[in-house]
Image (spheres, rainbow, N blue to C red):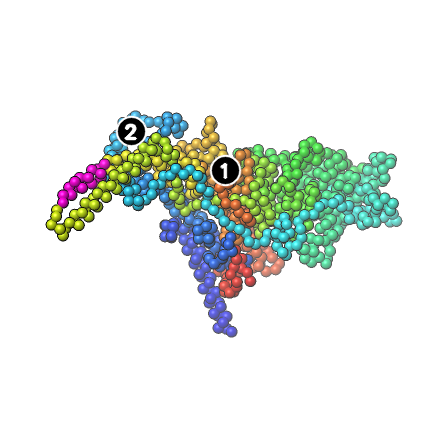
Amino acid sequence: MGASMSSHRDEQQRQIKKAEKHLKNQYDGKWHWSVEGRAHRPSISARKLEDRMLELQDSKQVYRKRRYLNPWRGNEHEKFPDVDAYYSTNKEYPRRLVVQAASNALDDTGPRHWSRRKIKGHVPLIIALAELCLNPLGLEQYESGYDDEDDADRHGRQRKEDPLSILQRIVHVIAATLCTLGLAWIIQLLLSIQVVTAPWSDDGTAEPYDEYENVQWYWPKHAVNVLDQSPENTKPQSQLTKLTIPRRLVVRDPVTKQWIVKETTELRDPKTGMLQSYIFLSFSRANYLGKKDHELRPFFYRIAEAMLKHENRDKHPDEPLVEAFWVDLDCVSPDDVNDKTEEAKAESKRTKDVHSICDAVRCAKRVYVVLPSDDPEQKRIWGQRIWTLPEVLLAAGKIRYCFSNPDTVENNDQDLPHFDVTLTDMYDSFWPGPTSRFHSSHEEQYGESREDVIGHLVNHYTNTTKLSELQLFTCAVQAMAQLSTGKDVQGYTTADMAYAAMGLLAYRISPNPTDSPFQAIARLSLVNDSDNLLERLVCLWPSHLPQSELEQLAQSNNSVAESETILRNIADRDQYSVHLWDIEPTCSVVGIGDDQHTPTVILDRCRGIPIRWKDFPRVKYVKDLNGFRATISQKAVYAGAWFLLTGFGLFSSAISLEFSLLNNQTSIDISMYLLGVALFVGCAWIISWFSPWAVRQLCNSGATGVSCHLVGFEGTMSLRDIEKIIYGNFNHRLTYAPSSTIFAKNLRNKKTREGMEPQDPGWWQQEAKNLNVPEGHRLFTIVDTGNMTVSVIAAERPPVVALICGREGGMVRALLCSWRFEQNCLYRECVMRMRSSVEYLATPNDWLKVSLASQGDVSRARVEHLRQELERQATPAPPTPPPKDQPTKVSVATLEPHIYTQALESSQTQAPVNGKTTP
């Protein structure tokens, strides 16, 4: 037994060392050779390496090899999750991502999670030779000709006649002549012996983009149809709302004359069955910090008694007396001691009472807002509670507020200060305008795009304006998310945000204690939404939060990946100045993911295009071969090839004839053959002088939509350099897309719908600062060879696929996503606008799992939660959290019992599927 345990420990240590060594090798920051060429691996600090290993462990806290379940349910290939990966359609399994990088990005030594290599193209040899002959010095003015004079003006090219340019021209002519005389014949030779085929073609049909195939095999946590969600979850999502009366009210006992709590079933009129009138007391516990329920109860009873006297004094003679009131201290059912589990608490009377507060407001005769004083700060504190906003919205036209200090004893006969108040009045005093929170230039710009959601809700419920169902839902959710300021005061957390908002909607959901705020809001949207809120939300590219709000989230322990952050600005204009309701979705959200700290959805009917990062593929060169120049160019190329081939034929015939007569005494003069050979070869050589020009004419068009690829590289380059890498020459094929990304706004041509190239190479970095691109984001360039456009994006990680999910403004919206193969989840890194025709050239997909948070944000959130969990496990009871200024260090050795305990057992279990081990 002891020997077996020792062997087990030895094997465990071996697995630990192997996994640790593998991860270190992938992040060693050195150049390595691979099948795809020489690449530079990323480098991160030792602390980041520990975080990475902690992040990549599986559900059993084991860092091990994983398998991916591909669209055909094949999972034979397994690998460690380490650096970023992409799905290879050729290999049908995940491969490590290698990103080609411009020189400025290649020199950057910052931390990354992908390898880099030099930019590489696949230019045909014939074109490379032709360009070498025509422009051996690489001078820009000799790279291509212009079809008309307007091109020179449009691209700002002017010929200079200074002495230096004249000298350059002379040297260029000499070098080009020598190269043409010495190398041009090789073009004829290659075409003659069919070593290569002609790269040009007259077939202008557009090829579709490369196929992207993926599918999510695992059940979502919640789905539109109960058959599409986990078999363990048998509850349907939809539940039609119905008006419910309060379960309990506070009334005066007729015998003792004391206030008591009674069930409303005992208070109905025996003849009509109607419930007697009552008033509703709305308050926030944050206004009465330090006060217990037994201390607040007499105070609210005194307030209610005074307000009831006022109601009965001013009532109409025909109206019945108001002799009851609702206050959550007594009218919300107490906790049941028998409800031990979270599921039981979710179905308890208390939970149902809390979630039906909106109905108690609807049925009330009057709603009184109770404050300790008339101080503006007390009003603001009351307004920040998420439950108070729907209360007053539903009570429009019957609101009053009163103020009284619970520490002072007042005469019951004395009228308490109370005032009639409208929603408009409350908007000005209880929810101060947001503009005062913005100070920096970016925050002022962000404030201009932020919608005053509470103002919109107030206008809607006062019938000043009318919001659509989609706008109402969106504004309500954003208002709830922004009002949450912490988790230490009851009523201030976003955990119940969806349940507070659903009182304003037609359908309701059953509470689920395991739902995150995003999952609850998503469920609420699925059952209420005929306007595809989630589908539109997926396509939205929200503005980056100002620094002040990021600091506020950090203080409340909310990371950027948390669902609270995703919902804080869904009603605002996004970075493209578009509202959520302006987007028309082309996909469907069929389910909600089960990720605890990641806002994920399951998308159906979206179309995918893979993004190629390792190099630029070879493209087609399409030319209308019926034109005069094309005809002459073809004849020049093929005539030279024919003369050369004929010369070789005569030469071979002469040699064969000479060898056939060696044994005979007969002699024959082959000088005429050799003269013919020289004549044909000489003609071919002379014609070859024109072949570089002819090849350039035949390969200079590159018609739009011929070879469709999305190719990316890290960094930025001039259009001239990009075009030479892809096509071998420069003829102004590529232009910057005028409205594809946020960087295109200041590069638009004033007359034509095309983008202009910045003159300063450092313009991109400066513009990124002006746009407040978050720290850690890098610039990537996406080249669309389908319509010859170039777009620059800012993202934390290179996206490997573009998902077309919606359209707006005459263009489609594509989610640029990175990928984690062990979870088979796509992470939204950026949103780019593309031409509408690209939708029909992309691959349709079924179920895809997509995270609305980026992979970097999700990784940081996951590591933070895992470290907190490890600290709780390592801290003896009662737990004492470590000081905030002293971060807890967790080394790989410390994590061994948590990460590698089951290393041996995992190898004996059934093959893991899609990154999850099946027992």
Callout 2 secondary element:
helix
Q: Which residue is mark 1?
A: 837
**Mark 2 surroundings within 10 Å by alpha-carbon count, few (fewer than 14), some (14 through 19), many (20 or more):** few
The answer to which of 117 and 130 lies nearer the viewer is 130
x, y percent for residue 499:
68, 46
Q: Which residue is mark 2?
A: 165
**Mark 1 surroundings within 10 Å by alpha-carbon count, few (fewer than 14), some (14 through 19), many (20 or more):** few
The answer to which of 422 and 169 lies nearer the viewer is 169
Answer whether residue 678 is magenta in the image.
Answer: yes
Residue 138 in view of the camera = no
Q: Which residues are magenta?
A: 668-683
Residue furthest out toward the left: 665
Q: Earlier in the sequence, mark 1 or mark 2?
A: 2
The image shows residue 511, relative to residue 758, as above or below, that is below
Q: Which mark is residue 557?
A: none
Callout 1 secondary element:
helix
